[in-house]
Amino acid sequence: MALSPATAAAVFYFFYFSIVGVISPYFGPYLKSLGFSSWSVAVLLALSPLSRLGPPVLWGLLADRTGQGRQLIQLASVLSLLGFLFALWRQDFWFMFLGLAVMQIFWAAALPLMEAITLHHVGARYGQIRVWGSIGFVVASLSAAAVIEWFDLSVVPWVILAMLFALAAVSVLVPPWVKTSHTADIPLRPISSFFRQRPIIWLFVCFFLMAFAHGPYYSFYSIGLAEHGYSPLQIGGLWNLGVLAEIALFWWVAHLSQRYDSLDLLRCSLLVALLRFACIAIWPEQGWLMAVMQLGHAFTFALHHQAALALIHRYFPAYAQGRAQGLYIMMSFGLGGSLGGLLAGAMWEWQGMLSAFLPAAAAAGVAYLLACYAIKPSVVSVNN
């Protein structure tokens, strides 16, 4: 049965981020239960952001060159499944390392290609499609919690494996790749040529800084809350509150996009990030404030992501979308997220939440100033 491009994309996002909903909260404890040291666990978990430093751009280039983005997503989905199977072959660090590296490299490569396809087919409705990824995260996280409660942590890799299999299966539904007039015998314009304009450079610096600001959040937020006396139930409730707020905004962001320019939405997300991370740094013991700041996740992730993708779609032509989306993933979730998390780890022993989240707030503040004063829509002109 043929599905519309919007429905097919929603199904893919649902299963793709269902995997995140299991890996993020439960895979670390599972690795710890195998007897791995904290450093070994940290190295294995670091493969996720590190996998976004190069492969997404290379796969984007291949998709732009060949026009076979849909087939590349299908191949990446299958190879990520095989990589995870290899990781489960033996509960040995190096088997885990090699298998997870393969899994993460191909899994990460599929997302920017899917983003380019979705934006091409649905445009401003992107948020209402991408929201199904957030729904998948919540459903998988809660379902996995129930399964783990019934059995134990040993079921975690099998749940992930089942979802990777489902992702590979639904990848056959992916809509066609971005239509472009370029063919294999016509040289593609180098992606570097678009960065001769300073506003585009500053735009990607903003992407980097926003992801850098989120590095401590994804790595140490739960640890910090626990140190301030929050129970596991309260911590889980705060995380789910943030995801629910994200879902709500993704659903309504198309209406915002019709009323406000994407650059204004980007600035709004950066300003909220400055406030959010400053409050987390200074008043983590205030439960009501942490709940309010979790509502801010709707702006610092959902609104920012929607605005970022819209600006990339605006400033880069169709034949460069795969590379531009890959570069966005690399600069933000890859480089920015990795360095932000590493700095937080280095600073944590000094003042905990304060020393980890104040640099995050500062990074968001710098990005906000750049978005206000260094990026003007009128001076960005890309030859499509």
Image (tube, rainbow, N blue to C red):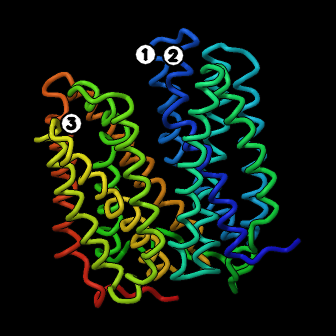
Q: Are marks 1 and 2 in contact (CB under 8 Å)?
A: yes
- Residue drawn at (47%, 32%) of the image: 46
Q: Please tell me how crowded label 3 is: few (under 14), some (14-19), or many (20+) other residues with Cα within 10 Å.
A: many
Residue 187 is drawn in which quadrant?
bottom right
Local secondary structure at mark 3? helix
Q: Is residue 53 left or right of residue 360?
A: right
As drawn, 158 above or below 267? above
Q: CA distance from mark 2 to mark 3?
A: 24 Å
Q: Which residue is mark 3?
A: 356
Kindly identify the amino acid type of the residue bearing the numbered disc 1.
Ser
Spot occupied by residue 72 in the image (x, y as percentages of width and height): 74, 59
Local secondary structure at mark 1? helix
Question: Which is more foreground, mark 2 or mark 3?
Answer: 2
Spot occupied by residue 314 in the image (x, y as percentages of width and height): 46, 82
Q: Which residue is mark 2?
A: 32
Spot occupied by residue 115 in the image (x, y as percentages of width and height): 58, 67
Kindly identify the amino acid type of the residue bearing the numbered disc 2.
Lys
Q: CA distance from mark 1 to mark 2?
A: 7 Å
Spot occupied by residue 24 in the image (x, y as percentages of width and height): 50, 37
Q: Which residue is nearer to you in this view: 338 or 282?
A: 282
Q: Which residue is mark 1?
A: 38
Q: Which residue is nearer to you in this view: 199 or 210?
A: 210
